[in-house]
Image (spheres, helix red, strand yellow):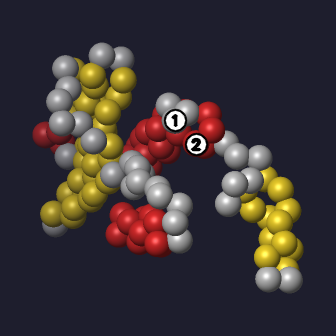
Amino acid sequence: MVAERHGQTAVRNILGHNKSFDAVPFFWSQHYDVAIRYVGHAERWDRIEIEGDPALRDCTVGYFQGNRRLAVATVSRDLANLRAEVELERDRVLKMPYELHYKPRRAVKRHGAHVIGQVGE
């Protein structure tokens, strides 16, 4: 999935859109019966919150800088990890300048076909 997103960004850049890759990173690993998932990016943090019990292979670990959650690791909690990814993605979009994540849509005509596109495309 991350490779697919990288490819989408590369194509946009080939087409001249000058976009950087800024999707929320994630990875997962399966070790026998233990599913480990990580979403976000935390090089440094000042607080960790653990919900559940790592010894029982069932927990969610949040990495924080101040009040901002930077990343989440889960063990055997796939749904919690997906929810964290959605929240981190939403927070990333909300922190973007208004003009970068909202462009009014309008109909444009390209090559004889009507296409709905973004203003400025």
Query: Residue at (36%, 17%) from the top-left corner?
Result: 67
Is the residue marked by circle 1 packed among few (<14), some (14-19), or many (20+) residues within 10 Å?
few
Image quarter where the N terminus lies is bottom left
Instruction: State if disc 2 and disc 1 touch (CB < 8 Å).
Output: yes
The residue pinned by badge 2 equals 100
Q: Position of residue 45 (x, y in %)?
A: 20, 26
> What's the amino acid at mark 1?
Met
Circle number at residue 96: 1
Identify the amino acid type marked 2.
Leu
| Whether residue 40 is situated above or below residue 50 in the rendered picture | below
Gap between marks 1 and 2, in whole Å?
A: 6 Å
**Disc 2 packing (10 Å; few <14; some 14–19; many ≥20):** few
In the picture, measured across the screen, residue 111 lies left or right of residue 4, that is: right
Nearer the observer, 54 or 48:
48
**Residue at the (75%, 62%) spot, across then down:** 117
Name above or below for residue 85 compared with residue 18: above
Task: From the top left corner, tell me how far across and down residue 78 is, in percent.
Answer: 38, 52
Q: Does 16 sit left or right of 79 as displayed?
A: right
Look at the numbered disc 1 and give the secondary structure of its residue: loop
- Marks counted in the figure total 2
**Depicted 98 relative to depicted 66: above or below:** below
In the rendered view of the protein, which quadrant contains the C terminus? bottom right
Visible residue check, residue 117: yes
> Which disc, if any, is residue 87?
none
